Amino acid sequence: MVLTVAANEGSITVTDVYNGEDKLTKDTNYTVADNKVTLKTAYLATLTEDEEYSIIIETNQGDVVAAVTVVDTTTEEG
């Protein structure tokens, strides 16, 4: 899952990412490149399906909040 953070002016720096009050670990739970925060598949797999989570991205220009719901999109072939 990729969350894109846009800057109002100048450049933007992502300082921390939280799931609610839980601080996520960079490079373990998420990565940052080109103002895009990518939540890793392994981290998403630890979350409860169909539950809504509040992902908070702290930046040098203020916080960005995204509501995220984990949905299993795989299909079983039979």
Image: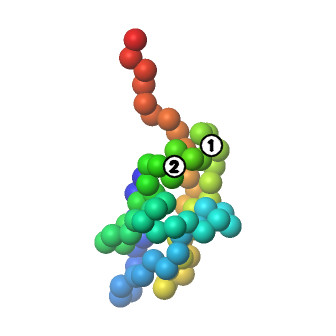
Q: Find disc 1 in the rendering and name its residue.
A: 48
Q: Amino acid at mark 2?
A: Leu
Compared to 41, does 31 lie above or below?
below
Q: Quadrant of residue 48?
A: top right
Alpha carbons under labels 2 and 1: distance apart: 9 Å
x%, y% of residue 28? 46, 62
Q: Residues within 10 Å of mark 2 (few under 14, many from 20)?
A: some
Of all residues, the one furthest to the bottom in this rendering is 10
x%, y% of residue 39? 45, 57
Q: Is residue 60 visible?
A: yes
Q: Quadrant of residue 53?
A: bottom right
Q: Find disc 2 in the rendering and name its residue.
A: 44
Compared to 13, does 29 lie above or below?
above
- Tell me the SS state at disc 2: helix
Compared to 7, does 42 lie above or below?
above
Q: Residue at x 42, y 70 (%)?
A: 5
